Amino acid sequence: MTKRKLLCTILILLTVCNPTINVSANSNIIKTNTDISIMTSDVIEYKYRINSKGQLQYRRWNATKGYWIDATWLNVN
């Protein structure tokens, strides 16, 4: 199997088996004297691609707030 086919297979498996990875989906409840407030954690998704050179890359997306966490695509080592 060539390197490009192997990377494509890994990318497909990561996307199909686990398209969203929740870094922290737990809620923290803070109790005060007057009220109870709930703080929810952001949902972070890992997006994958293969660039024109055949390198598998990833980038983190904040699904809760709707913006990229990483400025550029990062190579998977």
Image (tube, helix red, strand yellow):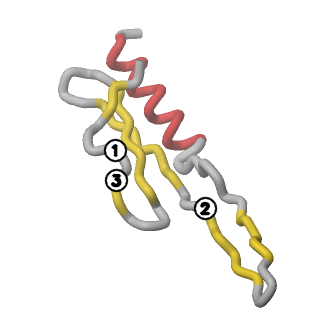
Q: Position of residue 23 (x, y in %)?
A: 60, 48
In the rendered structure, are the residues bearing label 2 and label 3 in contact, judged by CB atoms less than 8 Å apart?
no
Instruction: Identify which residue is drawn at 71% across, 65% down.
Output: 27
Closer to the camera, 10 or 67? 67
In the rendered structure, are the residues bearing label 3 and label 1 in contact, judged by CB atoms less than 8 Å apart?
yes
Q: Position of residue 75 (x, y in %)?
A: 34, 26
Q: Position of residue 1 (x, y in %)?
A: 41, 9
What amino acid type is highlighted by mark number 2?
Ser
Whole-Å distance between the Cαs marked 3 and 1?
6 Å
Number of other residues with Cα within 10 Å of mark 3, as a class: few under 14, some 14 to 19, many 20 or more: some
Instruction: Identify which residue is drawn at 47% across, 27% down.
Output: 10
Residue 26 falls in which quadrant of the image? bottom right
Residue that label 2 marks: 41
The circle drawn on residue 47 is none
Residue 57 falls in which quadrant of the image? top left
Residue that label 1 marks: 70
Q: Secondary structure at mark 3?
A: strand
